[in-house]
Image (spheres, coloured by chain):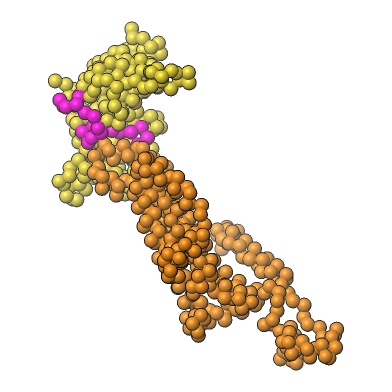
Chain colours: A yellow, B orange
Amino acid sequence: MSYLAVDHVTKIYPSLEPDAKKGDEFVVFENINFTVEKGEFVSMIGHSGCGKSTLLNIMAGFDQATTGGIILDGKETSKPSLDRMVVFQNFALMPWKTAYENVALAVRQSHPQWNRAEIKEWTMKYLQMMNLESAANRRPSMLSGGMRQRVGLARAFAAEPKILLLDEPFAQIDALTRGSIQEELLRMWEATNSTVFMVTHDVDEAILLSNRIAMMSSGPHAELAEMVNIDIPRPRVRSELIDDPKYMQIRNHIIKFLVSGETV
Amino acid sequence: MTLAKIISKGSKYKPYLLSLVILGVLLLAWSASTREPAFDPAGYSEDDLMMQEMNGDIVRDESGEYINNPDKLSAVPGPGRVFDKAVDELRHPFAKTGTNDHGIGWLVMYTLQRFLVGFLLATVVAVILGMVIGMSKTLLMALNPFIQLLKPVSPLAWMPLLLYTVKDPYMTSVLVVFMASLWPTMANTAFGVSNIKKDYLRVSEMVELGWFRRFYSVILPASAPAVFAGLRISFGSALVAVVPAEMLLGELGVGYLSWIEWNNLDIAGVIFAIMVVGFVGFLLDYGLSKIAERFTYTES
């Protein structure tokens, strides 16, 4: 049995069109069906507005599917939980807490029996893994965008969730910083043997990080067009990836899909 | 140090230099507009002069010349006279020379005491109610008509009703301050709580915070800036209300002082009382803003 199953999920909203009649619907996506195995890194790619963030919100429990459901480790999920930690596009750090306190909050909640010293040790461990030691006592307003997302990642990983859900985590980070954080994310994923599901619109990022990429067609009535296997061996080094012929093959395939809306 | 360096170092204080200049100009204007012409005995006959002296309109000064009686001048006093009055009052701030003649120090304390009691009472009630209302959309909408109806009522308008029911003038003045400080804090608290960024609430759901922790760790600090904004408005509103409340109730305090001075036609005293109220209010508000600073946060 799979670790995480997105089971025939459909999301329908009542239509917001100005000339809509009662009962008119807007189908964001329908029958999204795929699995994520334990330890995998799966990305989802698609146009803006195809509903990939909505799907992620449903997986996280912030939103409900109209039909279908999410099954994690054999149990159906509905509410948000520490099992499914989210890394948000706009970081969602509490501005009145320091970087340390933001991560420690998740640590304390996920390990309620720990004492203060244990929480501190664990929190500092994850902050160090993301190179945040010197920033531990700073509030988010004193941190750059890249550092804020590092805190977000540290918070999510430190809770040791069953799966991490990343919602376009690097969309608001400058291109130069993005590269280093992606590498830190890879290292964190490998070191902790976690399972990750990431939504992104950056093709190169998806190919660099993932085992598989789910391609979502455009909405409305969006669906899972194709699941692409990334059989490029790890470790993947960004600078050498360009030279791998498989990389360009996959990249072109995905971009053709995004541009034309059809899989070949 | 070169001249340029001195000037650039002092430029931090430039605005305050300007304040001093403005103050000087204002004092000059005040002084010029309230100058009384010196008494000129030339136009009066001997009998006139004797009559004026008997009335007390003119007196003889040290050199034996006639001058206008300073105690009977009916013009608005200039800065000099107000300054003299201030020095007089401040010389013995804690004297008690009669049931109604307590030193300015005492008066400030009486006013502060009834102000603080009313304000703190209102703060507790307003913050609790505001948070409850802010967290429940239903309650917010249900209570809104009542709040909107009661909010614009001047706190002084409550006074006759309060005096009639509570009977005690001290409690009445406290309750007038209470009514003045209630609404801004409650409205701002409710607003702050209901407008917490969705992301913070999502994170608190995600990490499975219990209701108490959620309130204490997320809702309270997230809404604190809005609460303090409300507090500062309430503060000003309460300070404004306490002065006329004292006047109307005859309760000893700084507000009552200006009323007494008015009854004595001691305009310098009235002006002095106004300045004391302003100064005390300024100090308290400054203190409150310093406290508020510790609870504010920036989001970017």
Q: Position of residue B54 (x, y in %)?
A: 74, 90
Residue drawn at point x = 72 percent, y = 71 percent: B32
Q: Does residue A252 appear in this view?
A: no
Residue A165 x, y percent position in the rendering: 27, 29
Which one is in front, B166 or B113? B166
**B60 sits left or right of B186 in the view:** right
Q: What quarter of the picture does the C terminus of chain B occupy?
A: top left
Over which residues does the magenta segment extend?
A: A71-91
Horizontally, is B250 left or right of A264 in the view? right
Q: Where, by quadrant of the figure, is residue A145 drawn? A: top left
User: With respect to residue B32, does A23 lie above or below?
Assistant: above
Residue A139, given in percent of the width and then of the height, sits at 35, 47
Q: Residue at x 36, y 12 (%)?
A: A257
Q: Is residue B221 above or below residue A211?
A: below
* Foreground residue among B240 and B94: B240
Q: Is residue A5 left or right of residue B274?
A: left
Q: At 50% from the left edge and 84% from the top edge, which residue is drawn?
A: B98
Q: Is residue B116 left or right of residue A29?
A: right
Say which of B186 and A147 sits in front: B186
In the image, residue B266 sits, relative to residue B60, either above or below, namely above
| Residue furthest front as drawn | B164
Residue in view at x 37 percent, y 46 percent: B133
x, y (%) of residue B136? Answer: 35, 42
Q: Is residue A233 above or below residue A93?
A: above
Q: Name the quadrant containing residue A190.
A: top left
